[in-house]
Image (spheres, rainbow, N blue to C red):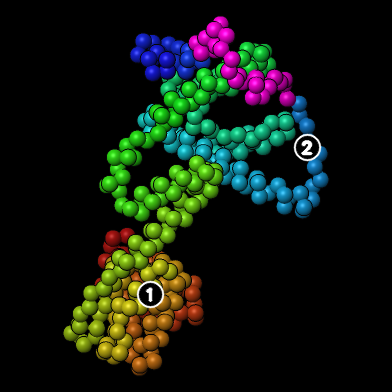
Amino acid sequence: IVYLVPKLTKAIPSSLIAIVVISLGTIYLGIHTKTVGDMASIRGGFPRFHIPSVPFSVETLHIIVPYAFILAGVGLIETLLTLNLVDDITDSRGRPNRECIAQGAGNFICGFLGGMGGCAMIGQTMINVNSGGRKRLAGITAGLCLLSFILFTSSLIERIPVAALVGVMFVVAEKTFEWGTFNAIGKVPKHDLFVIVAVTLVTVFTDLAMAVVLGILIAALVFAWEHAKHIKVATRIDTEGRKIYELSGTIFFASTANFQNLFSPQEDPEDVIIEFKQARVMDHSALEAIDGLADKYAQLGKQLHLRHLSADCRELLHRAGSMVEVNVMEDPRYHVADDLIS
């Protein structure tokens, strides 16, 4: 029904027609199956404002805060994923900051009305979008309909077969799934494929928050590993007999070992210059590696100069202060060109 009805008409959402047809079929054919009422009661009334009677103490905060951060993280992640998915489908651009602030404010207020916090749901959102919903009125209408169902037609809703809802959600899952991922299996790098598989499995067996955290950690480690191998050097001797190392790449905690292996203090002349035109110093580990290299040259009675450091690199050196002792060589031509560009 969900697949065929849109080919005939889009005036009525196909998922709604499917639920109504299946519900009427099970009732009039006398088919005994689990209904929504068998799972839980949805009867309710208007909420009343109340302040939770819990002791405000450090012990209470120790209990509440960890779960609050976990639920807030999961809710924000799923909301942003849903917003990104809707933007791709509708070719529009949402406002994630506003959505997150509104979600936090709504969850804060609903706690005083006896409600549970919530977030954007991919399944329900896809049903809304596939049914033609595009503007905020669609979400508001869905909320008002849900409220009216709970207040006035809960007895009818409780007679809906669970199988009808499962069928609709199965179609939503099938339409939401990115089937093109299978075509890219042989084309994407192996580490990206590993991240995809790991996040998918962790999502299925644990929860979305854990999967996102694990995916970020794996991706960060892979990124660091790959960029650590991309640091290179070219050497030459200038007219004054100084050896110049022309670095290219990023120097950070993962590439410091490779960085130090590029130099040979024992064989170098008295004056050595490291060119940083094509290199970036990213963190304190890189500064320590440079400082250690300078110490090696100093122990041999040789001088190590750093030239063409970027503004960010100079700021790192300035913050490090006396912790890092290096000789920075100025190049007037470089500064003139830099001033002209800026």
Q: Does residue 66 lie above or below 41 as drawn?
A: below
Q: Quadrant of the C terminus?
A: bottom left
The residue carrying mark 1 is 257
Within 10 Å of the Cα at label 2, are there few (<14), some (14-19), or many (20+) other Cα atoms? few
Tag 1: amino acid: Ala
Q: Does residue 235 lie above or below 311 as drawn?
A: below
State the image coordinates of residue 198 (x, y, percent, origin top left): 44, 49
The stretch of residues the image draws in magenta is 21-47
Q: Is residue 24 visible?
A: no
The residue carrying mark 2 is 52
Q: Residue at x 44, y 19 (%)?
A: 131
Q: Quadrant of the N terminus?
A: top left
Could you tell whether 72 is left or right of 44 in the image? left
Q: Report the label total.
A: 2
- Residue 328, quarter of picture: bottom left
Tag 2: amino acid: Pro
Q: Nearer the viewer, residue 171 or 249?
A: 171
State the image coordinates of residue 207 (x, y, percent, origin top left): 54, 43
State the image coordinates of residue 64 (x, y, percent, origin top left): 70, 47
